[in-house]
Amino acid sequence: MAATIHPPGTATTTRTALAKAPTGIRGFDELTGGGLPHGRATLVTGGPGSCKTLFGLEFLVRGALEFDEPGVLLAFEESAADLTENVASLGFDLAGLEADGRLVVDAVRIDASEIVTTGDFDLDGLFIRLASAVQSVGARRVVLDTIEVLFGALGDEAIVRNEFTRLLRWLKDHGLTTVITGERGREGQLTRYGIEEYASDCVLVLDHRMHEEIATRRLRVVKYRGSVHGTNEYPFLVTDRGLRVWPITSTALTYAVSTERVSLGVPQLDGMLGGGVHRGSTVLITGTAGTGKTTLAASAVDAACARGESALFVSFEEAPAQIVRNLRSVGIDLGRWVDAGLLRLWGERATAFGLEAHLSRIERLLDETEPTIAVLDAVGSLSNVGAESEVTSAVVREVDMMKSRGITGILTSLSHDAQRESSSVAVSSVVDTWLLLRNVESDGERNRLLFVMKSRGTAHSNQVREFLLTDHGAELLDVTVGARGVLTGSARLAQAAEERAAAADRSAELERRRVALARRTAEVDAEVAALRAQLATESAELERLAAEESRGASTRAADRERLARRRERGSDDVPPTAREG
Amino acid sequence: MDDAGVAHDDGSPSPPVYELRLYLAGHSPKSVRAVENLRRTCEQYLPGRYRIELVDLLENPQLARGDEIIAVPTLVRKLPEPVRQIIGDLSDTEKLLVGLQLRGAGGEQ
């Protein structure tokens, strides 16, 4: 009975988020939280060659192919044949989509030199064309490219403005998600005829500019009513799979993580890391020139291929053949893995393309190869391509690309200053394991040391190891710690020799002492024997004396008896002694 | 075929026949005005040598594509060539004559 009374227009709008129409343009939908405002008009403006038309076309093509939303393109600048041809290289088959009834391309040719205006008119002709096209395929998306042509051709600006407003209202009333392209005006004007004031829901600006001799395309969301959006300029590029926008902020930290450990190909190093690195984690190897970064990375690849896993090795410094040759000298044969189809080696100079093209290529390599381990050697080379902050964000995105695919990533980076524990690219915070290789110079040699700077989720060793490149691969040795600190190379050998000599000395001394002790023992034994002999002699003497004494006593007793007996017989009271005295 | 411009016996050029098509959208005041203005001007300047075809785009929307119609009313001069488009209710007779190339931008033919 008592139905809830809503203010007009709010009864069904219980949803708070704006409905969005995904464009299918890689990166863009992440950036805008879902795409363009659904059922509304978006203005895409930019200078000549800024890919406005392409943006609109991809929005239509992806809509038809991926989101089951047929579309209509009203093209005022190019013929249908030109458009079809231009986007064929991006894999868009406009003619095929038209034949399937999922797309209408209506190229409106307006030749201002053939047109005279006289008196009042309206754009019902255009409306009727658009309406019939929309109806014919049941379109949900419309692109008007570039509608500003009308302002120039029809002269009467007041009428065109009025009609344009009516057109936008009509599109909105029909719930059509629309992209209107506009030519960028001069001096801060977003469009030449100021049509941005009509497209009030969403405005995108595309830009194409040169920065240090490298062309970079950028996209900016100037306005997006009712939606949060990134406000930065985002690089984008035209790839053979359409546009690719590279949002930085959209990178969500939602990777699956593995507790499985994978070997880096150097058993001693695996030991230092508690059995290797986690699968899908990222390892950064930094070091000065010639410290063996590439070799260490190659060891990990070698180990992965030996386990039968696929791998990708991208070098920005060496050609694939050169990598294979050089690594063979340290006993790592990557050529056999390439032949076995397990390893893809890819070499290109980082300067050949801009950063975004570089990222796109890496992404493509990862998609095509689907490796379990990927090496980027060396990410520092990118510094030639862009400013430091851009390079850092590019590397972060590379790390994300690998992590989101569960690929164990190995990045190498050249550090110029051996003393500073940093690499030329400040990405150590995004990697999971950081190995530092350092040359130490002493006694006329340079030797390599390896440190485990960090390893997330691992009780890693705090020990320094000497890193050797042998003819059978990389090896780690326990370093010798001597009086002068950590010893490596020949100093380590010398120290070992000294220690051996000292040990020899010590054992000789021991032997000498042992002999001396034996001798002394013998002496003591002899003395004891002598004493015993003496004791025996003395004892014998004593017995002899005792025997003599007992004989003497019995003699005396006999004498006394004899004397007594004599007294009894003679005068008892006169002792013989007194008589004598 | 086209005898326009072929010299007559008396030496004067044969006046070409004007083939005109007027695109409209329904019977709006603009449409009505445009038809009236066109008829009047043709009677005055092209007596006996014009043909007018009226096309209502509301009835035949697909015809808009053929002549690249975006605005209505639009008058298309099919013949004599080249094809010309005159957009509007044709209320400015001078402009209409210029558009039909019955008069140079400067003045009389």
Image (cartoon, coloured by chain):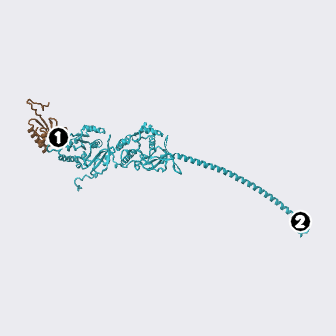
Chain colours: A cyan, B brown
Neighbours of disc 1 within 10 Å: few (<14), some (14-19), many (20+): many
Residue A300 place in picture, x, y as percent: 45, 43
Q: Is residue A248 above or below residue A113?
A: below
Where is mark 2, residue-wise? Answer: A565
Q: Chain of mark 1?
A: A
A125 displayed left or right of A473:
left
Residue A573 place in picture, x, y as percent: 89, 70
Asked if one can make out residue A417 in the rendered structure from this viewpoint, the answer is yes
Say which of A87 and A5 sits in front: A87
The residue depicted at 54 percent of the width and 46 percent of the height is: A493
Specify the farthest residue to the bottom.
A573
SS state under label 2: helix
Q: Chain of mark 2?
A: A
Say which of A87 and A504 sits in front: A504
Cα separation, mark 2 vs mark 1, equals 192 Å
Q: Which of the marked residues, 2 or 1, is nearer the chain's N terminus?
A: 1
SS state under label 1: strand
Quadrant of the rendered image containing residue A241: top left
Indicate which disc residue A115 carries. 1
For the image, the number of numbered tags is: 2
The C terminus of chain A is located in which quarter?
bottom right
